[in-house]
Image: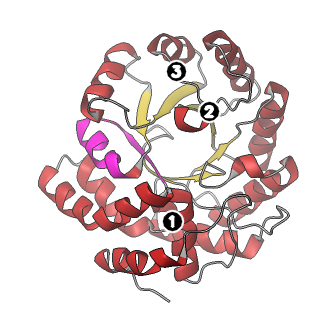
Amino acid sequence: MTLFHGLSAFPITPATPDGQIIADDLARMLLRLRSARVDSVGLLGSTGTYAYLDRSARRDAVSIAAETLAGDVPLIVSVGALRTDAAVALSQDAAKAGADGLLMAPVSYTPLTQEEVYQHFLAVAGATDLPLSIYNNPGTTHFTFSIDLLVRLAATPTITAVKMPLPAQGTVTDDFAALNNHLPADFVIGYSGDWGCAEALLAGAQTWYSVVAGILPEPALRLTQAALAGDAALTAKLNADFDALWALFRAHGGLRVAYGIAHMLGLTKALPPRPILPMPDSATPDLRAALAALDVAQA
């Protein structure tokens, strides 16, 4: 079974205002994921605020995660950075600290060309022997992978998967079919954008890269298992239980909602890195109601 399959849970990274990892809080969250038996942990993803942490803090987070998960759950680490040499160094740090796989978005300030991103990924893919998943996140990076570029990158032995966004137009079913028709049979296609991932799994995608699983792993795992089993009726029922939470994700962003849930469950008092602000207090009743709809016990 490929590393990039099933439910990949992306937790927040509790840190002090100056960007130092709060080890006990991070370990507490990771132990929940280990206990739930998610298929993998996606450390330092967008929800893990990797772009706001320096190399030392990111290295600390990987070490804490590797020690806490203790090989029971595969560890995928995001290594995106503005510079290629920095991304290479981060990938080598992750490998040395015990990561099982890598995830990378083409972070940029100056808009990148398809060839620049190709060369960037080749350099990072060649820096370790860990499998690497492409993170196609145009909402953040303002770069969209063409199918031609994905096909070129899929020919690289260590680049084995892609994390896709929900399509801006059309259905995720059609989007998956178009990708699946062009990419190699053993290349793993997964999706992020929590509210649309049940549909993606039913359509044949193999991976849900999930924000909500990083903080509420059990209900996310039930939804994943139903969708991967092809049980459309059960998937629809379980996904409907998330409707109130998905509405908050769309209104405030998954990162802010994840911090709000972490506070509500007493897992950490850490705040998102500034300039990101927490959810407004006015959203607290809606969040409590969304958790109640999922039968989540609240502190």
User: Amino acid under label 3?
Assistant: Phe
Q: How many labels does the image show?
A: 3
Is-magenta flag for residue 209? yes
Quarter occupied by residue 112: top right
Q: Residue 170: image x %, image y %?
A: 27, 29
Q: Which of 275 and 261 is in front in this view?
A: 275
**In which quadrant of the rendered image does the N terminus lie?**
top left
Q: Residue 239: image x %, image y %?
A: 26, 59
Which residue shows up at 50% across the image and 30% down it?
161
Farthest left residue? 233
User: Where is mark 3, residue-wise?
Assistant: 145
User: Where is mark 2, residue-wise?
Assistant: 141
Q: Nearer the viewer, residue 118 or 67?
A: 118
User: Where is mark 1, residue-wise?
Assistant: 257
Front of the two marks 1 and 3: 1
Which residue shows up at 69% across the image and 29% down it?
129
User: Amino acid under label 1?
Assistant: Val
Between the residue at mark 1 and the residue at mark 3, the CA separation in whole angstroms equals 28 Å
